[in-house]
């Protein structure tokens, strides 16, 4: 077996040209021969994995249409490395072409406005296109809760105060703002209220920016405003970093609930919180999240809920039959991450295929006890702590029949220690990301 | 050292999977017979598509079931603080056996990407 890793990157790129003659047996067939039609709203880690596995596991017998508002996907995974110039946006921009060419996924660009119908559904796009299907899977990622002071019309304006929490131009904007910082300037960032996308992400970002300031600017401040009473994940690791290698740079402020952002006429930025006001050259607000807009628009969020309730054996919405919610938009109690979104998509793909197969028999393949006892999802991730060192975090979740929920398997949950971060982990991080990108998008 | 994101990985194995799934297919229009498939897919985030073509982590395909079982079993009892040692602890002995059997039934990739012999093995196993 050829071990493929970043060191072989160039060799592999060369080889790919020679081996470009990919079999195309999973290419889309005529619509009459499909067992079912599925529309997927959102082409991130959840949506793309689902599209691929539905085609793969059905031997191409399911028609899969994936709709995303963007022409390709910019990965949030590794996106903090844009901020310290380790990577460029192009490095983490993932094309949908392999899903089309190799698996016959139909990819459409557009924004989904509505889903109408009962057993047979119509997905309506903003460009007047529509898709007829039997099942709809929502994988739209996240929306942000309004921040007073950033609100502009119907939306928050992140042009001056970036969130950089949905990777893309926002990530570059924050990088460019960091670039303008002078020696001694202050960077303020806010942690969103749990549950939020990428649990270690905000603290990881604080480390990446602190490292950048230390190496490039010499001196400066990073103030982390956290609404939680303490660091929510990898506490020991991040405390060691904040109080150790970054003690002259990072100030961690717990119980700091962001009330509003103020941008003064002289351009000065102010974060007003429950524990005081913080002025900074650059402010990075990561607002508290809720499910993607379409989830709320379709009435899948009970009043007062931020994320959609789902049945964990299938990810079908508890509010509407035949509509599923995977990834960051559901409230399944599992961490919101690209790796986990991929994991959930596979459980959902398996459930949908079993649902379709059950239709022609009296058997319920979805609730087959042999299946239920083996429903698993897992999460693993690496966080850069310095320029070339990273930490890791891992967890496995298992389906619990009595509570009908996914539960953390206690012994599977762990973080790196002794050492808490290392160069070896940093290298593994690229193997992990490359594998995850590949398993999801290619 | 410049770390690279591999954006150009060739997709070589799609056809192979078609063969696998067809070979275990039944009269049913859509195959749901393989119970370990969805659980085994949870390994693919790091160990490649259904165990194929990982990007630097171990390749699980084509190892003997005992080899995979023993390795994962050791991890269940290990006190090492390694990421994979903890991932393994997310599964029971019985599940590890099912995973090992599943991966052992998948063809092992070779440098030449020749799949003929493995395909034969696959059919014999099934």
Image (spheres, rainbow, N blue to C red):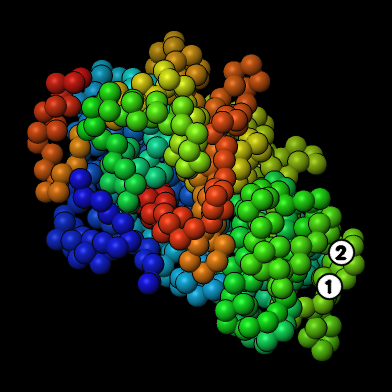
Q: Residue at x 61, y 57 (%)?
A: A201
For residue A350, side relative to residue B71 (left or right):
right
Q: Are marks 1 and 2 in contact (CB under 8 Å)?
A: yes
Dot 1: chain letter: A
Q: Residue at x 73, y 58 (%)?
A: A191
Q: Quadrant of the C terminus of chain B?
A: top left
Residue A51, horizontal then vertical, whole percent: 41, 43
Q: Nearer the viewer, residue A249 or A282?
A: A249
Q: How many marks?
A: 2
For residue A277, side relative to residue B86 (left or right):
right
Q: Residues within 10 Å of mark 1 (few under 14, many from 20)?
A: some
The residue at which mark 1 appears reads as: A278
Q: Nearer the viewer, residue A35 or A312?
A: A312
Residue A7, horizontal then vertical, whole percent: 29, 63
Whether residue A100 is visible here, answered yes or no, is: no
Q: Residue at x 30, y 19 (%)?
A: B28
Residue A346, horizontal then vertical, whole percent: 44, 36
The residue at which mark 2 appears reads as: A273
Q: Nearer the viewer, residue A349 or B8?
A: B8
Secondary element type, mark 1: strand
For residue B96, side relative to residue A169 (left or right):
left
Residue B69, horizontal then vertical, whole percent: 33, 25
Query: Which of disc 2 and disc 1 is earlier in sequence?
Result: 2
Residue at the limit of the structure toward the top, as seen here: A362
Establish if A202 lies above or below A136: below
Establish if A378 lies above or below A66: above
Establish if A255 lies above or below B28: below
Whether residue A289 is visible here, answered yes or no, is: yes
């Amino acid at each position: 077996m050829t071990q493929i890793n970043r060191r072989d990157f160039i060799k592999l790129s060369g080889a790919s040209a020679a081996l470009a003659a990919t079999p195309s047996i999973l290419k889309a067939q005529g619509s009459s021969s499909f067992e079912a039609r599925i529309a997927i709203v959102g082409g991130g880690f959840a949506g793309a994995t689902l599209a691929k596995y539905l085609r793969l596991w059905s031997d191409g017998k399911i028609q899969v249409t994936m709709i995303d508002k963007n022409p390709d996907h910019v990965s949030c995974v590794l996106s903090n490395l844009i901020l310290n110039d380790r990577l460029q946006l192009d490095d983490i921009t993932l094309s949908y072409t392999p899903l089309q060419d190799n698996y016959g996924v139909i990819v459409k660009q557009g924004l989904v406005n509505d889903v109408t119908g009962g057993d047979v559904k119509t997905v309506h796009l903003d460009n007047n296109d529509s898709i007829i299907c039997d099942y709809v899977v929502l994988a739209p990622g996240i929306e942000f809760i309004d921040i007073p002071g950033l609100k502009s019309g119907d939306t928050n304006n992140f042009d001056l105060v970036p969130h950089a929490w949905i990777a893309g131009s926002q990530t570059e904007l924050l990088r460019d703002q960091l670039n303008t910082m002078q020696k001694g300037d202050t960077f303020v960032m806010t942690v969103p209220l749990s549950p939020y996308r990428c649990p270690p992400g905000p603290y990881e970002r604080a480390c990446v920016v602190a490292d950048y300031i230390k190496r490039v600017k010499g001196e400066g401040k990073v103030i982390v405003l956290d609404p939680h009473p303490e660091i929510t994940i990898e506490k020991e690791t991040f405390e060691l970093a904040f109080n150790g290698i970054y003690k002259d740079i990072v100030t961690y402020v717990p119980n700091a609930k962001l009330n509003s952002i103020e941008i003064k006429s002289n351009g000065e930025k102010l974060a007003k919180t429950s524990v005081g006001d913080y002025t900074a050259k650059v402010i990075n607000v990561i607002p508290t999240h809720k499910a993607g807009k379409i989830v709320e628009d379709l009435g899948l969020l009970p009043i007062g809920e931020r994320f959609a309730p789902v049945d964990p054996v299938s990810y079908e919405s508890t509010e509407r039959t035949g509509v599923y919610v995977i990834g960051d938009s559901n409230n399944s109690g599992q961490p919101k991450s690209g790796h986990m979104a991929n994991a959930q998509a596979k459980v959902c793909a398996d459930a949908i295929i079993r649902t379709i197969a059950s239709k022609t028999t009296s058997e319920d393949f979805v609730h087959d006890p042999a299946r239920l006892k083996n429903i698993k999802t897992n999460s693993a991730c690496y966080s850069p702590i310095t320029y070339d060192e990273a930490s890791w975090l891992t967890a496995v979740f298992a389906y619990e029949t009595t509570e009908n929920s996914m539960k953390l398997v206690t012994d599977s949950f762990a973080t790196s220690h002794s050492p808490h971060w290392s160069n070896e982990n940093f290298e593994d991080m690229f193997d992990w990301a490359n594998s995850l990108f590949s398993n999801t998008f290619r | 050292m410049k770390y690279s994101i591999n954006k150009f990985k060739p997709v070589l194995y799609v056809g192979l999977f078609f063969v696998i799934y067809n070979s275990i297919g039944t009269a049913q229009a859509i195959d749901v017979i393989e119970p370990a498939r969805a659980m085994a897919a949870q390994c693919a985030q790091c160990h490649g598509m259904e165990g194929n073509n990982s990007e630097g982590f171990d390749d699980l395909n084509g190892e003997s079931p005992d080899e995979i079982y023993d390795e994962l079993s050791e991890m269940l009892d290990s006190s090492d603080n390694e990421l994979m040692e903890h991932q393994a602890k997310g599964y029971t002995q019985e599940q590890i056996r099912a995973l090992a059997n599943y991966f052992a039934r998948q063809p092992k990739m070779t440098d030449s990407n020749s799949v003929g012999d493995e395909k034969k093995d696959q059919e014999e196993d099934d």
